[in-house]
């Protein structure tokens, strides 16, 4: 899976983050990935990626912080 690179050519995510996302995607395909508080089954690919990155962040992997929403005027 090619990673998205910034203009300087450095990797945006570390290898540990990639492994976490890979594990989350595998669980989603198997139907065993559950979301946090509600415990509902995750079927969305985007949500599986978000869960993997969140868990990698918690484990101390090289993952940029979440994007902040801008206030609308």
Image: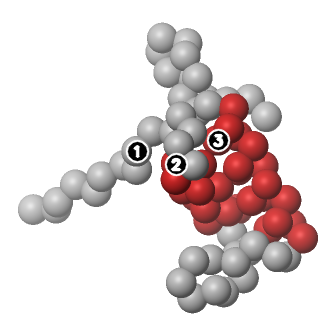
The spot of residue 3 in percent (x, y) is 67, 30
Answer with left or right where residue 29 lies relative to residue 39: right
Q: Which residue is mark 3?
A: 17
Label 1, secondary structure: give it: loop
Residue 46 in view (yes/no): no
Tell me, yes or no, whether the two marked residues, 2 and 1, touch with CB atoms within 8 Å: yes
**Against 15, is 71 above or below?**
below
Is disc 1 surrounded by few (<14), some (14 to 19) or many (20+) residues within 10 Å? Answer: few
Please state if 50 lies on the left or on the right of 42 as rendered.
left
- Where does the N terminus fall, quadrant-wise? top right
CA distance for labels 3 and 1 = 12 Å
Left/right placement of residue 1 relative to residue 44 reads: right
Tell me the quarter of the image containing the C terminus: bottom left
Tally the marks.
Answer: 3
Q: Position of residue 54 (x, y in %)?
A: 54, 56
Front residue of 3 and 39: 39
Density class for disc 2 (Cα within 10 Å; few <14, some 14-19, many ≥20) is some
**How far across and how far down the image is residue 65, in percent?**
40, 45
Badges 2 and 3: C-beta atoms under 8 Å apart?
A: yes
Residue that mark 2 sits on:
57
Which residue is the extreme one toward the left? 73
Secondary structure, mark 3, is helix
Q: Position of residue 19 (x, y in %)?
A: 75, 43
Residue under numbered circle 1: 65
Disc 2 to disc 1, how far (Cα)? 8 Å
Disc 3 crowd, CA 10 A, few/some/many (<14, 14-19, 20+): many
Residue positioned 78% across, 49% down in the render: 22
Q: What residue is rendered at 64% in x and 86% in y?
A: 39
Measure how far apart labels 2 and 3 are at the Cα level.
Answer: 8 Å
Which of the two labelled residues, at mark 2 and mark 1, occupies the earlier sequence position? Answer: 2
């Amino acid at each position: 899976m090619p990673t998205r690179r910034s203009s300087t050519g450095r990797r945006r995510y570390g290898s540990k983050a990639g492994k976490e996302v890979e594990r989350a995607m595998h669980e989603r395909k198997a139907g065993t990935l559950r979301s946090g508080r509600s415990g509902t089954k995750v079927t969305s690919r985007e949500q599986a990626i978000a869960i993997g990155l969140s868990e990698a962040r918690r484990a101390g992997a090289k993952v940029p912080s979440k994007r902040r929403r801008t206030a609308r005027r």
